[in-house]
Each structure stands twice: as structure tokens, then as C-alpha cells.
Amino acid sequence: MPDFRVHCLPSVTDPKEITLSPEESHHLVAVNRAAQGSTVVAFDGRGAEWICELADADKRVARLKVRFAQRAKPMPWRITLGQALPLGGAMDSIVRKATEIGVSVIVPLESERTQVHLDGDRSDRKIEKWQTAALEAAKQCGNPWLPEIGPVTAAGAFMEAAKGYDLKLIASLQPGAKSLRSVLAQFRAANNRAPLNVLWLIGPEGDFTPAEMTRSRARGFEPITLGPLVLRCETAAVYALSVLSYELSG
């Protein structure tokens, strides 16, 4: 895969040339030091890619000459991550790793034990920051599909409204939680196929409350164990998504 990747939203569906934004131009030319004639892959985050040649290495308005276009295949499955907001910058890391794994949707949640509360402009700024983190991760790993990052939502309201999924999972530290493999095997036996659209909720520091777990089960969520150890929420998210994507790919 070529070294240089840039994000763009061309105004036409079949561009012959692409002019990059000031931010993308600076990153490509000044930060990554791409030179005139370098091969650059431009992508729109929706599966479209253009293999290009850097025609004008201007760090303010770089210009690409399109060699050919290609369409990336989507993942065979769709994973939505509902992540209770963690402390510090852990959400940035979770967004990056989820993008690398190929998650389709990320919904930041405010749960009963969430210690981070975002309102108004602060919420909008955080979402923009997470979108930037997802874009950077997509460039680094070659993912042509950017995840949708939803608005900050109350966990209870999200559980109530969660519909249209083949499986709804929630990571749980409580006794009686099942293994992911057993739940997937049960689904395959009942439906003669793997699930294609899966929702997974990951709690904050201290996990979801017993009341939230009860509410989730009433709405059809399966409590899933992530093993005998208590994981940090960012570790739990990466672990859960990695194992799920591996099992769905098998």
C-alpha cells in the first residue's frame, strides 16, 4: 500500500484532479513530506478511493492528478460500539482502535457511573475531536470507511431505542454472563448464519450499574463476560471488538 493517504470529498463523482483542503495539504506536504510525483491514495471515508499522483506539492493547496478510481468492499458485518464515556483521553484511544478494527458506528454514552458529562458546545467539540482521531487512524491503517460517530446519548435512552440488530451485547462483570462464543454459536444454530449487525455496549470505570444491566436484559441485550480479570474500559473495548470481529470473520 502506498505510504501517503489523504481524505477528501470531491465535488464530482469521477474527478480527474483533486484539490486538497489546507489541513490535508499541510499534513501531506509539510508533515509527511510527500514530493511532486509521489503516489497518493485519496479516500472519502465512504469506500471510494482514488489512486493519484501529487501534481503540485503546495503545503497550502496541494493538487492531485487522478490515475484511476476504485471502490473498496465494505466489511461483511456491521458493528456498533456504544461506549460509556471514560475519564481523560481514553475515548480518543478507543475511537482510534475501533476505527482500525473496522467498527461502523460509535455512540458515546452517559451512564449512571459516567464521571464525564458533556453539554452543548463542549459535546460538539469532543465529537469533532473524535472524528479527527478516527480520520487519523483510518489514514494509518488504510481503512477506506470512516465510522459514524453519534451524539452523546444517555445510556438508558440508547438501550430503549436500540432496534434492528441481529445481536445486542453488553460487557458484564456480573455472575451468569455468557461467553461470546457460546452466544454466537446459539445465534448460528438458530439462524443458519452468522450475525451481520451487532451492537456491543461497554461500560465506564466501575461498569454499568445493576439497574442498567437489568434494563439492558429487558431490552434483549446478552450479558457477555470478557474473562476473569477486571479490565480498564479502553482495554475492554479493544478486547471485545477484536474478539467479535475475529469470530464474525471466521
Image (spheres, rainbow, N blue to C red):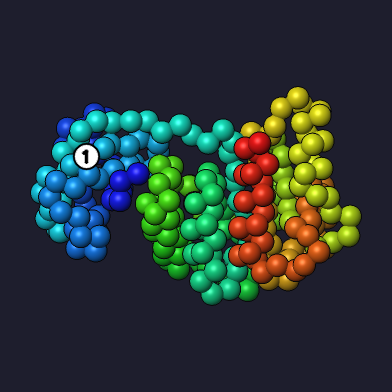
Relative side of 172 to 75, left or right? right
Q: Residue furthest front?
A: 1
The local secondary structure at tag 1 comes to strand
Q: Would you place residue 225 above or below residue 53 in this image?
A: below
> Which amino acid, by three-letter code, is at mark 1?
Cys
- Mark 1 — residue? 52
In the picture, measured across the screen, residue 43 lies left or right of residue 30, that is right
Residue beneath the point at 39% across and 54% down: 140
Q: Quadrant of the N terminus?
A: top left
**x, y percentage for residue 104?**
53, 44
Q: Position of residue 23 (x, y in %)?
A: 24, 58
List x then y, in percent, for residue 32.
25, 60
Q: Nearer the viewer, residue 114 or 121?
A: 114
Q: What x and y, as percent, mark residue 82?
A: 62, 53
Q: How many marks?
A: 1
Relative to 152, is 244 above or below? above
Tag 1: Cα neighbours inside 10 Å, few (<14), some, or many (≥20)?
many
In percent of the image, x 52 and y 46: which residue is there? 102
Can residue 100 be seen from the camera position used here? yes
Is residue 99 placed above or below 228 in the rendered structure? Answer: above
Instruction: Give residue 182's quadrant in the image.
Output: top right
Q: Name the residue: 62% across, 51% down.
A: 242
> Residue at coordinates 61% horizontally, 58% vertically from top-left?
238
Residue 135 in view in this figure:
no
Q: Camera-side residue: 125 or 229?
A: 229
- Between 131 and 100, the residue placed more toward the observer is 100
